[in-house]
Image (tube, rainbow, N blue to C red):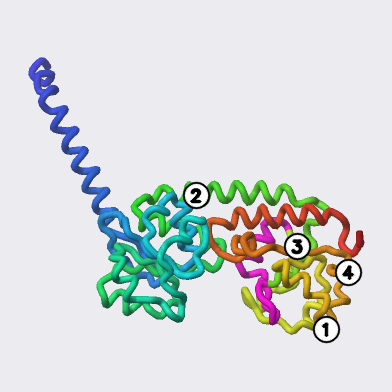
Amino acid sequence: MSRHHGWAPVLAPVLALMLALVLTLLATTARAAGVVDDRGRRVALAPAPQRVVSLLPSLTETVCALQACGRLVGTDRYSNWPASVRALPKLGGLEDTQIERIVALKPDLVLVPGSSRVIDRLETLGLPVVVLEPKTLQDTQRVIHQVAQALGDAGAGPALWQRMQLRMAAAAARVPVAVRGQTVYFEVASAPYAAGESSFVGETLRQLGMGNIVPAALGPFPKLNPEFIVRAQPDIVIGTARAVAEMPARPGWGTLRALQGQRHCGFASEPWDALVRPGPRLAEAAELLAECLAGLDRPAGVAR
């Protein structure tokens, strides 16, 4: 027995060193494994990227919500949150992405939406491209996890999503009982285009206990015949402040009881971005909607 005890001081540091080497190997392997993107392609990213280009606002916001804003070296022209990203080089949009400027920034990770036309070109130039484009709440959860993994901090994704879920649940609890179940027309663009039940906006409204005049069968963001909206007579209308202000002048829309009774939510451009981007600010979107809906706490069809 004493002989075994005599080996202990020698074996302990050796075992500790072996354990450290194994953990290091596992961590390196995990980083080298990279991330599987929306194409089903595994993109190797080792070490964790430090120079990131994001070409979609929701992806930019996800990077920042994961406390990695300082790694961004350029974004698309529409990325404007948080305020710090406005000073970064703007690299165009879906139709006019500035490939040469991206290459000059020497990124070790480029986050792009699947709708981008420059994916193949960027990869031909040797840049590590991860294709992600959230369209539903489930997508948003998945993309948050994937971006966190791509950044080398996989645990940050689930933690962020959990915080978002808690905020969204708290927002839902603030929607008055008298308002729950009422139908909403949510206009995303004048034509009119609406957010249907199957969109991430529709899913957020459903989490808040609200109905939707646009069924899932019509798609996430369908273009509607204005007569459809007039016939549906939504209990509540939601849109930009500018759109809501001009709705009564549209042919036939003066008959909408929601407009007659001032049962609408009109948002300025900055909060509006949070409502229509499937990213980490969806919790803020739920809070904004809940706040407005709480101000409409009276039975549908009853004017002030």
Spatial CA span between label 3 and label 1: 21 Å
Spatial CA span between label 3 and label 4: 13 Å
* Amino acid type, label 1: Pro
* Residue beneath the point at 69% across and 78% down: 190
**Which residue is label 1 attached to?**
251
Residue 160: which numbered mark, if any?
2
* Residue beneath the point at 39% across and 53% down: 70
* Amino acid type, label 2: Leu
Viewer-nearest of discs 2 and 4: 4
Q: Residues within 10 Å of mark 3 (few under 14, many from 20)?
A: many
Q: Position of residue 119 (x, y in %)?
A: 36, 76
Spatial CA span between label 2 and label 4: 41 Å
Viewer-nearest of discs 2 and 1: 1
Q: Are marks 2 and 3 in contact (CB under 8 Å)?
A: no
Q: Position of residue 280 (x, y in %)?
A: 53, 56
**Which residue is label 4 attached to?**
260
Viewer-nearest of discs 2 and 3: 3
Numbered disc 2: secondary structure: helix
Numbered disc 4: secondary structure: helix
Spatial CA span between label 2 and label 3: 28 Å
Q: Is 297 located above or below residue 187 in the figure? A: above
Q: Specify the segment rendered in magenta.
A: 188-209
* Amino acid type, label 4: Gln
Q: Is 184 located above or below residue 250 in the figure? A: above
Numbered disc 3: secondary structure: strand
Q: Position of residue 81 (x, y in %)?
A: 52, 59
**Which residue is label 3 attached to?**
265
Spatial CA span between label 2 and label 1: 45 Å
- As for residue 169 lying within the magenta part, the answer is no
